[in-house]
Amino acid sequence: MLLNESPGLDRVRRLTAEAIGTAFLLIAVVGSGIMASRLTHDTAIQLLANAAATAGALVGIITMFAAISGAHINPAVTLASRALGTISRRDSALYIAAQVVGACVGTILANAMFDLPAVELSTQARTSGPLWLSEVIATIGLLLVIHGCVRTGRSAAVPYVVAAWIAGAYWFTSSTSFANPAVTVGRTLTDTFTGIAPSSAPMFITMQLVGTAIAIGLIRLLYPQPTPAAQILQESP
């Protein structure tokens, strides 16, 4: 919090950062997917371009907003931080609301940039056991990467290791690693390369929450005592 700044204004700043950060993430995910599908019909190249653009954007987004809100930009990260006692119940609920709103706005803006309907519900069904298992694994790995750095005093590495994990998980998970409930909601609003049908989203989100719960247990087991170093993603300023 800035000196002489009211708690209310500080909260507004943090929620704005979460909304804008999540919006930028969806712009990167959806926009790069649309661009890739227009430039090539090779699915492998489309996925490579989508993963690279998303990873690059994550480095920038986390660097931009970490000092303001912690740059959660993901309800799974916020829920884990709440479970570990580093964010209040009220703030965690507000963070999640801001993230979901930001995700929807980001998708709408990405659609608009490519002259598509602002909102076009996806028809791409993503429903199978392997996809659901992938979301559990992707979410566990993401949270362990984040808190493994934060709780051992290596917070400066978080933007890069998160980007690396997500880029890799695009390729080694069959679901292409959504690992983010807000992103999942946002991606229902685009009928493009990165879309997910609204009927498929609830199970994806459920599996992400399962992964979050498992990750919280693992974080407590593996990193029971965080170091006193600054905790970028785990703590809110």
Image (cartoon, helix red, strand yellow):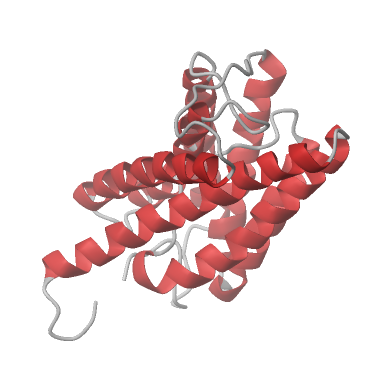
Q: Residue at x 81, y 46 (%)?
A: 48
Q: Residue at x 20, y 69 (%)?
A: 10
Image quadrant where one finds the C terminus? bottom left
Q: Position of residue 109 (x, y in %)?
A: 47, 46
Q: Is residue 64 above or below residue 48?
A: below
Q: Is residue 193 above or below residue 159?
A: above
**Farthest front residue in view:** 115
Residue 128 occupies which quadrant of the picture? top right
Residue 125 occupies which quadrant of the picture? top right
Q: Position of residue 54 (x, y in %)?
A: 65, 52
Image label count? 0
Q: Is residue 100 above or below residue 6?
A: above
Residue 22 visible in the displayed image? yes
Image quadrant where one finds the N terminus? bottom left
Q: Residue at x 72, y 46 (%)?
A: 50
Q: Nearer the viewer, residue 139 or 14?
A: 14
Q: Residue at x 65, y 35 (%)?
A: 137
Q: Position of residue 56 (x, y in %)?
A: 67, 61
Q: Position of residue 37 (x, y in %)?
A: 76, 37
Q: Nearer the viewer, residue 49 or 208?
A: 49
**Farthest bottom residue in view:** 3
Q: Nearer the viewer, residue 206 or 125?
A: 125
Left or right: where 87 falls relative to 209: left
Left or right: where 73 falls relative to 129: left
Residue 72 visible in the displayed image? no
